[in-house]
């Protein structure tokens, strides 16, 4: 029913645009305040009225500033004589319509005209996120109100997010539901002219969670590979050092045989007294110096030295 009333108000708005009326939106249950912007001059033959639609009168101001409120508005409306403004308290949906300030007496004047639309506050909005792809950060945002929902898909990476569809809003007879992206945050806004509700989600944080799992898995794999390489290098180094050590120990423990000389002839018996070379004995041999030969011997040269080698045989 409220949407039907609003639809009627929208038609009034369209007609008022043709007439050049000023639009005023007011929240249901609030006060409506209408001003007169053009100057008003009254005399004894003229009166000032606030009129609702075409036949209902709200209040009257006479030449002497006397104020009169008509039936149905006493206690819930005020008309001010110094500026001719109108205040309507606790407006209801049936208060939506045309409000006209009229100066009567002779030729009718209209110093102010308004198209008033009373609206209810919008309902809260529910925003949900679902992943539409397992291998990329494609997120579907769904905005839901009481009798309407819209969905939009966004693609995010490590740096930013972008919209995959162009249509961002939808409008029913009562309100507008809009989805828009600002940096890495998506907004779902349900609003009309007098109220709004919104819900937000940070898309990048959702993608960071997914990419965080992927990065964690990649980190684990990388760490395992690095550890395996280090273990292989350490084992190879230990094996190489052990092989070198074993080779050195083998060389140090090797016994080299001393070649033996095989004698083919029996050794010459040596003297037990000394292993030194045979002792050489020197002897001077002179000729016989008898009486007959002494003179002759003096006249001759000294005897020559004779050398003889004497070998000492060991005792038996």
Image (cartoon, rainbow, N blue to C red):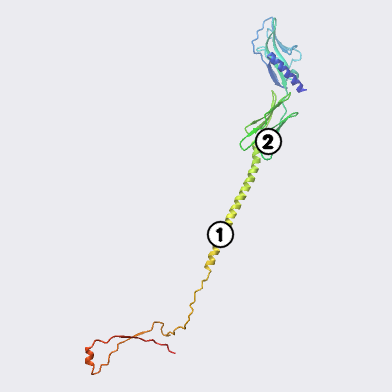
Q: Residue placed at 59% from the left, 52% from the top? A: 229
Q: Position of residue 42 (x, y in %)?
A: 67, 7
Q: Secondary structure at mark 2?
A: strand
Can see residue 67? no
| Category of crowding for the residue at label 2, using alpha-carbon neighbours closer than 10 angstroms: few (below 14), some (14–19), many (at least 20) | many
Q: In the rendering, which numbered label is found on residue 240? A: 1
User: Which one is earlier in the sequence, the residue at label 1 or at label 2?
Assistant: 2
Above or below, 168 relative to 308: above
Rounded to the nearest angstrom, the CA distance separating label 1 from label 2 is 56 Å
Closer to viewer: mark 1 or mark 2 = 1
Q: Position of residue 15 (x, y in %)?
A: 71, 15
Q: Quadrant of the C terminus?
A: bottom left
**Res. 1 image quadrant:** top right
Q: Secondary structure at mark 1?
A: helix
Above or below, 205 relative to 232: above
Q: Residue placed at 57% from the left, 59% from the top? A: 239
Q: Position of residue 59 (x, y in %)?
A: 72, 12
Q: In the rendering, which numbered label is found on residue 139? A: 2
- Of 242 and 50, nearer the camera is 242
């Amino acid at each position: 029913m409220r949407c039907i009333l609003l639809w009627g108000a929208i038609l009034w708005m369209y007609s008022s645009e043709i007439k050049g009326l000023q639009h005023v939106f007011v929240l249901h249950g609030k006060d409506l305040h209408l001003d007169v912007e053009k100057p008003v001059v009254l005399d004894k033959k003229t009166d000032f009225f606030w009129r609702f639609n075409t036949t209902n009168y709200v209040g009257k101001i006479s030449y002497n500033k006397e104020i009169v409120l008509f039936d149905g508005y006493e206690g819930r409306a005020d008309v001010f004589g110094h500026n001719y403004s109108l205040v309507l308290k606790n407006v209801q949906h049936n208060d939506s319509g045309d409000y006209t300030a009229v100066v009567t007496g002779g030729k009718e004047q209209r110093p102010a005209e308004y198209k008033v639309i009373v609206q209810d506050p919008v309902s809260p909005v529910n925003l949900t996120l679902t992943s539409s792809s397992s291998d990329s950060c494609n997120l579907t945002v769904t905005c839901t109100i009481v009798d309407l929902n819209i969905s939009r898909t966004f693609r995010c990476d490590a740096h930013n997010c972008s919209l995959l569809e162009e249509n961002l809003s939808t409008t029913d007879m009562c309100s507008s539901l809009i989805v828009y992206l600002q940096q890495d945050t998506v907004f779902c806004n349900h609003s009309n002219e007098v109220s709004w509700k919104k819900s937000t989600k940070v898309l990048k944080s959702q993608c960071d969670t997914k990419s965080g799992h992927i990065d964690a898995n990649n980190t684990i794999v990388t760490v395992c590979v690095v550890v395996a390489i280090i273990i292989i290098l350490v084992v190879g180094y230990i094996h190489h050092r052990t092989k070198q050590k074993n080779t050195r120990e083998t060389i140090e423990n090797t016994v080299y045989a001393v070649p033996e000389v095989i004698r083919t002839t029996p050794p010459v018996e040596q003297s037990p007294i000394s292993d030194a070379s045979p002792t050489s004995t020197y002897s001077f041999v002179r000729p016989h110096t008898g009486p007959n030969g002494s003179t002759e011997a003096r006249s001759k040269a000294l005897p020559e030295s004779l050398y003889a080698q004497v070998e000492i045989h060991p005792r038996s």
